[in-house]
Image (spheres, grey):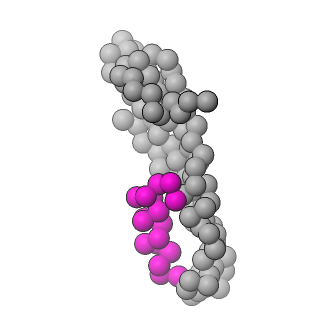
Amino acid sequence: MDDPLRDRRPPREWAAASQVIEISEKIRCFDQLSTIIEADLIALDAAKIAAGWRDLMVTGTLDYGFADAQEDVAALEISLAAEITAVCQRHLWIYARRWMMKNRI
């Protein structure tokens, strides 16, 4: 199956198709996200961080449509989430940190 994200089409064409693309990839596939998460985790003791956190999944959707009733302005709504479990060294409790991003452009 072809990767729809590699299909070079104008935004208006994506919007007209009301295309929804589901994403499910390892964190390591998202360079900037990996850097942000690593910066958060650096404050914790390395032994308290889930081994292989970069292999955990990022899930989400890209939802194409129109921003106006006349269908002149194409819109893209992005929703992504990743969850990593770690132990807080100060409070001695386990927590799951969920990184979520939702945006409409």
Locate residue 30, reporting x and y percent: 47, 54
Coordinates of residue 77 in the picture (x, y in percent): 45, 35
Front residue of 56 and 94: 56
Residue 66 visible, this angle:
no
Residue 57 part of the magenta-drawn span: no
Residue 60 occupies quadrant = top right
The residue sitting at 62% across, 82% down in the picture is 48
95 above or below 62?
A: below
- Kindly identify the residue that appears in the image at 57 percent across and 60 percent down: 98
Q: Judge left or right: residue 29 versus residue 52.
A: left
Residue 37 in magenta stretch: yes
Q: Residue at x 42, y 32 (%)?
A: 76
Depth check, front residue: 37 or 70: 37
The part of the chain drawn in magenta is 28-44
x then y, percent, for residue 51: 63, 74
Tell me if residue 53 can be seen: yes
In this rendered view, identify the residue nearer to me: 1 or 22: 1
63, above or below 72, in the image: below
Predominant SS of the magenta segment: helix
60 over 17 or under it: above or below: below
Residue 39, position in %: x, y? 43, 72
Residue under the image location 36 percent in, 35 percent down: 105
